[in-house]
Amino acid sequence: MRTYMDYVLRCFYESTGWNEDNIYPNITLTSQSLLDFKVPNGFGLNLSSQSSPNSASTYNLTNLGFVSGSVAYLYSSKPLCNIQSTKSMDLKDVVTGYKLLTPLRETESRLYWNQWHGAARNQKRDTLYYGRMYLPGRGLEAMLVRRLSPTTQLLITCVSDSHLKNGGTLTMHYQRDVGQWCNELIYSTNEALLGVRGMFNFGYHRKLREYYNASRLSIGGELYYGVLNKSPGLSIAARYVANSAYTGTPLTLTLTCNPLVGHLSTAYSLMASNSTQLSSRFDFNVYSYMSDLSIGCEIWKNKYTVGSQSGPSDTAPEIVDIKSPEFAVKRESRLSSRQSSSFTMSNGTCVPEEEFTNVLKASTSFGSRNVKLLWEGRYKELLLSSGVMVNLVDGTPVISTIGVEVQYSC
C-alpha cells in the first residue's frame, strides 16, 4: 500500500499534468505490483493530515522489537484540492496493482502554460518540497520536484545518515516527456554516478487520433557509469499493452534484458475481470543457466455482495457500446483524471466501474521458495494492511515476516 506522502506526490503529478507511465523505471510496474509487493513487518501506525491545500504532514510509528518513527512535512506551491482522506479515497488510488496506462496526449503549449496577471507573465513552474526526519536515528531525507516547462521536470532527492558513505547521497533527475518519447539525465554523488534513460512509444501520432488507445508498444533503455568505481550498467526493456477491444481483456507483456550480467526477464500480466488480476514472470541468466518462475494474483472484493440488500443486486449493470463517441470521450476523461478500473469485454460492451472494499494478494517464487499473502482494505475510516511471508527452503514452513500497518488521514 502506498504511503500518504506517495499518494500526495501522485496527486501533485496529476494536478500538474505529468505522466508517470512514460518514465522508464515504471515500464515493469504492473508485474512488480502483483509479484514483488512488500509485506508489513511488525506493527506500523501512520497518522496524516492536510492542514491546507498546499501543505500536508504525516507521523509514523513502528514497533519491531524497538520503537522507532519519523515525522514528515510536504509543501506544494500548487493547491492540491484532489487529495482525499482515508474515509473517502478510492482504494485503488493507494493500492498498487494492475496498471491501466493513461492515454497518450499532446503536450500542453507554452502559450497556455503561462499565467497572465495583467501585463505580467508568470509561468506555472509548480514546485513540491518534502522532508522527513527519522527518530531516534536522526536520519534525514528530502525531495524537491519542480516543473520547468510543459515537457520538463527537475527531481532532486537527498539522504543524510551517519551510516552512509560520506554521510549521505544527493541524486538529481532531469526529465523530459514530449509524449512520443521521454528521456532522463541522472547524476548522483554516490560514486559520481552518471546515467541516461529513455523510452519511445510507437505509433504516437496515430494514437492521438483514436478515441482511446487500444494497444501500445514501448521500448526503452538506460545506461549509467560510476566514475569513481569505474562500474558501467546497461539495461533494455520493451512493453506491450493491449486494452479491451483487440484482445478482449487488458494485458501487459514486458521483456527486460541486462546484457552485462546476462539476465533476461519476461512477464505476462492479465486483467481477467474487474476484480481479478493475474501475473507471471520468468527470469533466466544466460551465464549461470539459473532460472526462476514467479506467479501472483490479486482478488478484489466488491462493496455489494450477492444477496446484499444495500447494493444493486436486482438491477443489471448498464451496458455501454464502446464504439460510440460518447463512451470514448467519457473513458478518456476518466483515464486522464485517475487510474480507471473499468473493464471492457471482448464482445464490445463495457461494465461500469465498481467500488471495492478490500483486496487479497498472493505470490510465490519457485526459486526463492517463499509464499506471500497480503490483505489490504478499509475499516470505517482506517486503511489496514496485513500480511505474512512463509519460507519453504528446508521443506518446513517458517514464517519469516508478519505484520500489520494502519493508516489514517483527515
Image (tube, helix red, strand yellow):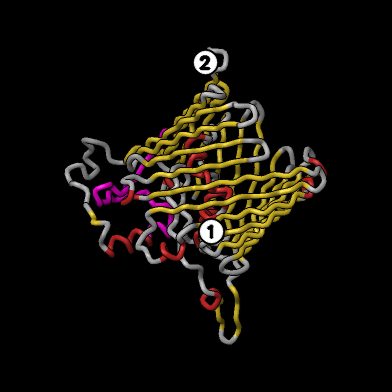
Residue where numbered disc 1 is placed: 13
Nearest the viewer among 209 and 10 is 209
Q: How crowded is mark 1: few (under 14 residues within 10 Å), some or many (20 or more)?
A: some
Residue where numbered disc 2 is placed: 397
Q: How crowded is mark 2: few (under 14 residues within 10 Å), some or many (20 or more)?
A: few
Identify the secondary structure beneath mark 2: loop
Q: Which residue is drawn at 67% across and 52% down?
A: 131
Note whether 274 is above or below 212 in the view shown: above
Note whether 198 is above or below 361 in the view shown: below
Residue type at mark 1: give it. Answer: Tyr
- Residue 213 appears left or right of 394: left
| Range of residues picked out in magenta | 333-361
Q: Residue 274 placed where, x, y %?
A: 33, 43
Of the two numbered discs 1 and 2 on the same chain, state the one appearing first in sequence. 1
Q: Residue at x 23, y 36 (%)?
A: 306
Note whether 296 is above or below 47 in the view shown: above
Q: Is residue 35 one of those drawn in magenta? A: no
Residue type at mark 2: give it. Answer: Pro
Q: Is residue 348 one of those drawn in magenta? A: yes
**In which quarter of the view is residue 212 placed?**
bottom left
Q: Which residue is drawn at 61% across and 65% down?
A: 152
